Amino acid sequence: MGTAVKKTISLPPELAKEAEELAREQGKTLSAVVQDALRLARKGRLKREFYQMQGYWSQKAKEKGILTEKDLEKYLGK
């Protein structure tokens, strides 16, 4: 990892306790547990955005009558 930026965060007591227990169980630092949680949240957000875009373009294709790869090839003139 490159450089780290230090941040101060506030957590409700029960969440702080859970995070500390998780860190202890996994043999990680509290910082590593928070980083993992943020990465997981980012991955979930990107996955949702991907599916939204996929749905949008699938709908556009259906509107044009493109339902198969063969339809797409015809549409693209291949």
Image: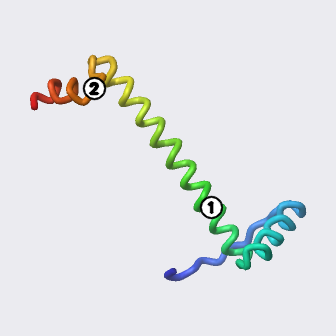
Q: Earlier in the sequence, mark 2 or mark 1?
A: 1
Mark seen at residue 50: none
- Mark 2 closeness class: few <14, some 14–19, many ≥20 residues within 10 Å: few
Classify 25 as above or below 72. below
Which picture quadrant has residue 36?
bottom right
Query: Going 54% across and 54% down the picture, which residue do you hit?
Result: 43
Indicate which label's residue lies in the foreground, 2 or 1.
2
Classify 74 as above or below 5. above
- Quadrant where the C terminus sits is top left
Name the foreground residue: 61 vs 4: 61
Residue 4: give x, y in percent of width and height. 57, 80
Position of residue 30 in the picture relative to residue 71 (left or right): right
Name the foreground residue: 2 vs 57: 57
Could you tell me which secondary element the residue under label 1 belongs to? helix
- Three-letter amino acid code at disc 2? Thr
Could you tell me which secondary element the residue under label 2 belongs to? loop
- Mark 1 closeness class: few <14, some 14–19, many ≥20 residues within 10 Å: few
**Separation of marks 2 and 1 at Cα, in angstroms:** 38 Å
Query: Going 17% across and 29% down the picture, which residue do you hit?
Result: 73
Query: Going 42% across and 36% down the picture, which residue do you hit?
Result: 53
- Three-letter amino acid code at disc 1? Leu
Which picture quadrant has residue 33?
bottom right
Residue 8: give x, y in percent of width and height. 73, 72
Which residue ends up furthest to the left in the rendered image? Answer: 78
Query: Going 30% across and 22% down the picture, which residue do you hit?
Result: 67
Which picture quadrant has residue 37?
bottom right
Residue 22: give x, y in percent of width and height. 78, 69
Mark seen at residue 38: 1
Position of residue 51 in the picture relative to residue 4 (left or right): left
Q: Which residue is mark 2?
A: 68
Name the foreground residue: 66 vs 42: 66
